[in-house]
Amino acid sequence: MTVYRFRVLLLPNPALEFEPDTEVWRDIEITGSATLTELHEAIFDAFERYDTHAYEFLTRDEHGIALRSYAHPQMYSGDESWPPMTDEQVERFLEQVIPDDEPEEAKAKFRRIRQNPPEEGNAAETTIDDLDLDQAQSLFYEFDFGDGWEHHIEIETIREGSLEDEPLVVDTQGDAPPQYPGRESE
């Protein structure tokens, strides 16, 4: 069985006054047979959240290009992962956001994926193994679209093995902020 170790980095959220001095992250080990919904639940618990909300995962390649979205089961529609962009929108984005030194093949891939988005996946029906990840890739995870808790997920290791407890938080850094700053958890 494949075991993944993910570093889940909580990104700053200035709107909720979460701008830590040091990175806040959790290392989570989980088997490849777990669904993205199960990974969501592990992250939810690891960051001490208590009020459920919608979420989404994006797979990203080694250049950070979003390859496909995986939606919360109740939000899953089977439509495209994102709205297609016109040639003009793609070129404007490339000019404003993508570094000039990015390889032309990465820019061509971005154009292709943004103009012809893949079908979104259902997080409850997609296992981590289904993503066919390698260590050069990463994931993006957003929880609670209203408050926008964003996470960058790095692949620390991919190995063959087993887990006694599944999933497992194996390392942490920093305190998890309250889900709703200024409000006591219930």
Image: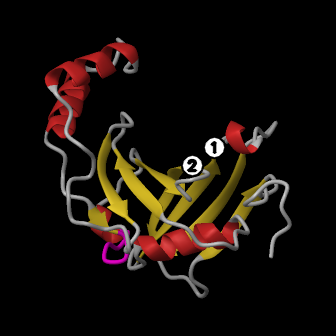
Whether residue 125 is in magenta: the answer is yes
Residue 70: horizontal and vertical position, in percent? 34, 61
Q: Residue at x 15, y 35 (%)?
A: 112
Q: Position of residue 128 (x, y in %)?
A: 38, 69
Residue under the point 77% across and 41% down: 17
Residue 139 lies, with reference to residue 126, above or below; the image says above
**Is residue 160 at least partly visible in the picture?**
no
- Check the image and tell me how it is coloured: secondary structure
**Nearer to the camera, 85 or 171:** 85
| Residue 64 figure quarter | top left
* Residue 150 circle label: 2
Distance in Å between CA atoms under marks 1 and 2: 6 Å
- Amino acid carrying label 1: it is Leu
Q: Is residue 133 left or right of residue 41?
A: left
Query: Quick check: is 121 in the magenta stretch?
Result: no
The C terminus - image quarter: bottom right
Q: Are marks 1 and 2 in contact (CB under 8 Å)?
A: yes
Sequence-wise first label, 1 or 2: 1
Q: Which mark is residue 11?
A: 1
**Does the magenta stretch mainly form a helix, a strand or a loop?**
loop
Relative to residue 99, is residue 161 depicted above or below?
A: below
Residue 93 seen by the camera: yes
User: From the image, which quarter does the N terminus lie in?
Assistant: bottom left
Residue at image position (59%, 55%) is: 7
Q: Secondary structure at mark 1?
A: loop
In this rendering, the answer to whether 168 lies above or below 20 is below
Magenta segment boundaries in residue numbering: 123-128
Total marks in image:
2
Q: Measured from the top left, where is residue 63 in percent x and y?
A: 36, 33
